[in-house]
Amino acid sequence: MSSREKEQTIALSAVFQAAELVSILAKTGQVDNASLQPLLDSILMVSAASTEDIYGGQWDCSSNLGLGRKITRQALGKERSSVNPDTLRYALSLIHLENKLSKAPEMLSIIGQRIPQIEQKKTHYESVLHENMLASISGLYQDTLSKLPFRIQVQGDSRFLQQPHVANQVRAILMAGIRAAMLWRQLGGKRWHLIFKRKALLNALDARN
């Protein structure tokens, strides 16, 4: 097991956590802020010393991504059937969409310019969970990733999805998922690894306990 595989499991856990939160939010209109905040904070973390630091540092990374770690273990292991099908679809869609983004340099440039602006806004609010912060991240997603030919179709209860606050949360979480998928790719992760390197990834995931 390599240190690279350990880092890959962090990114993959974040992808699955984002996917699960979108699935929950779309169906219930609510989401656990303890699982949400580390993902949103990661969007604004553009210069971290380590992969762990992107999600809270050595001591908090595992707990911050606890939900994603659990689902990643299920998805890669023998409990795949217990994972929500929508969660699996969103996770794979995030990886696919990020791959499209990686081939769109102008869009990457726009995202790179806008993130520091959003980070600066955070000084005016207590948390990235503030409605104005969510709206800014959601707007970034709308102005960039939603323009690509491939779009992630979120399915759920229209009573919730039509609410501006919930819609902003969904798009903000998807942006966080793209951040994680980008990290996964930068660390050498590939979609076929989810099939042919499952054992190595599971070993690395368990080693983080």
Image: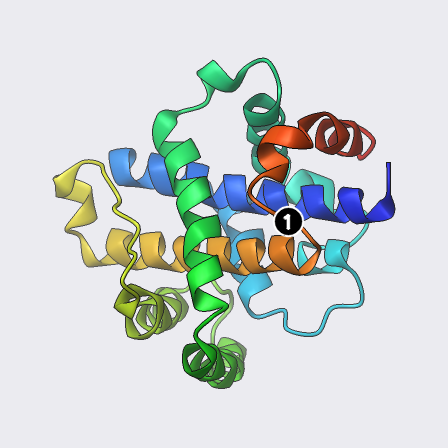
Residue 208 or residue 35, whichever sits in front: 208
Measured from the top left, where is residue 152 in percent x and y? Answer: 30, 50
Q: How is the image coloured?
A: rainbow
Residue 142 or residue 190, whichever sits in front: 190
Which SS class for mark 1?
helix
Quarter of the figure that contains the N terminus: top right
In the picture, measured across the screen, residue 151 lies left or right of residue 85, that is left
Which residue in the structure is indicated by mark 1? 11
Q: Residue at x 41, y 70 (%)?
A: 133
How many numbered circles are shown? Answer: 1
In the picture, measured across the screen, residue 4 lies left or right of residue 33, that is right
Measured from the top left, where is residue 142 in percent x and y? Answer: 29, 69
The residue type indicated by label 1 comes to Ala
Q: In this view, does 152 lie above or below 26?
A: below
Q: Which residue is drawn at 48% across and 53% down?
A: 177
**Extreme residue in the right direction:** 2
Q: Residue at x 34, y 58 (%)?
A: 171
